Amino acid sequence: MSSASEFATIAIDAMGAELGPAEVVEAVVLALQEIKHPIRLILVGQASVLEPLVTAKGLDNDERVQIQHAPSVVTMDEKPKDSFKNKASSMYRAIELVREGEAGAVISCGNTGSLVFTSTLRLKKIPGVERVALATIIPSREHHWVLIDAGAEPETSAVRLVQNAIMGSQYCKAVLNVKHPRVGLMTIGTEEGKGTEMIANTHQHLKKLEDTIHYVGLIEGFDTFRNVADVVVCDGFTGNILLKSLQSCVRTLKSTLTDALKQNPMRMAGYALAKGAFDHMSKTFAPDRFAGAPFLGLNGVVLKTHGSSNRTYICSCIRIAVETLTSDIRGQMEKDIEKANTMMKTTASSESDQPVVHKPL
């Protein structure tokens, strides 16, 4: 879907948010006001709950807003296999709308495991993709960057990391408008050979894809905020720890600074004088601008946002869904991954043909 004249149709699991369906409806109001591209939003959930909320906001006769009844809800502690069996849930039905072509994207604040499991089984993966990956955008002082994988696949392989690098690069182009994203591979040092054998193999593969992605090599943790790479590639275990550590660090710094400024009138006066600077810093690192994280590698756009997301976060997720839908991200991913897979198979085949040399004891 790339034509600017087309509507971007998005199915929203309206029952999965911790703040309730009312907050989701408020996000819809914001999205209709702020997003310039033509959109249609399908609220999936219990009609008896959603209809009064939509009517109260004057959206009951708005052709851009529809309600799709789904009587059941996936709980946060529900196991993915159990939730998959519940065909009447708002999450399952929202995903089905994408599979049936009624919507181009699905958004949910609900159970992450259930969302990945059901989306993968119902939408299927892009040909050649081994596993889906969760991509999230991290705000920084000089530039924003994409972290992939942020938690979808804790255990991975060199092949999957290469595929993640390709998918992350295409996503960065679509949402951050970076023409030639710099891709870095996360490890414990920038010297050749640093890290695990899997990292070393991934590094060698990525170096051979210079005409597909702009690979800048191995990077360390402190490089992430030094404007070295636009896409940071790692396994989901490392990525999820990094993401949550960064989120906790920002909250800690904010609360510590707030407490320190409130200690006496002189500090409060200083804060008043520097309020412009503090507002600028807050806006730069505000997480709500890129609140939605897509599961890349699926035949359809699936975005996850925090269970505690408010209307601003959910509206941001809707905007990201629109930007992803209006780019040719899926088609280009498939072409680049096919090329990378062919290269890696050829490399593996040539290496297996090499004679085995036994070193003397």
Image (cartoon, rainbow, N blue to C red):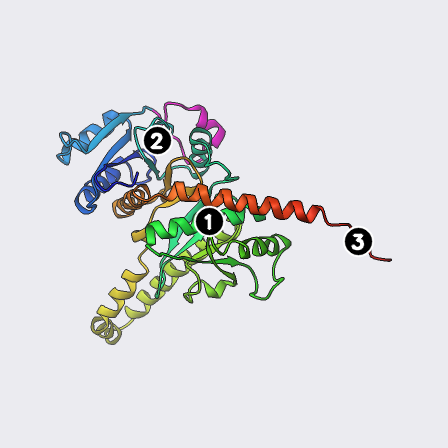
* Residue at the spot 44% in from the left edge and 31% down from the top edge: 118
Three-letter amino acid code of the residue under disc 3: Val
| Secondary structure predominantly adopted by residues drawn in magenta | loop
Packing grade of label 2 (10 A; few <14, some 14-19, many >=20) is many
Binning the other alpha carbons within 10 Å of mark 1 as few (below 14), some (14 to 19) or many (20 upward) gives many
In depth, the one of 326 and 226 nearer the eye is 326
Residue 114 lies, in percent from the top left, at 44, 34
Instruction: Specify whether residue 207 is in view.
Output: yes
Q: Residue 98, which numbered label?
A: 2
Q: CA distance from mark 2 to mark 3?
A: 53 Å
Q: SS at mark 2?
A: helix
Pinpoint residue 282: horizontal percent, then vertical percent.
29, 62
Q: Which residue is mark 1?
A: 166
Examine the structure image and report whether residue 248 is included in the region drawn in magenta.
Answer: no
Q: Nearer the viewer, mark 3 or mark 1?
A: 3
Give residue 191's quadrant in the image: bottom right
Tell me the quarter of the image containing the C terminus: bottom right
The answer to which of marks 3 and 1 sits earlier in the sequence is 1
Question: Which of the two labelled residues, at mark 2 and mark 3, occupies the earlier sequence position?
Answer: 2
Q: Residue at x 47, y 27 (%)?
A: 82
| Secondary element type, mark 1 | helix
- Residues at marks 2 and 1, CA–CA distance in whole angstroms: 24 Å
Q: Is residue 156 visible?
A: no
The residue under label 3 is 357
Give the residues in magenta: 72-89
Q: What distance separates the C-alpha of mark 3 from that of mark 1?
A: 35 Å
For the N terminus, the quadrant is top left
Q: In the image, residue 166 lies at what x, y percent?
A: 46, 49
Is residue 77 part of the magenta span, yes or no?
Answer: yes
Give the amino acid type for the residue marked by disc 1 in the picture. Answer: Ile
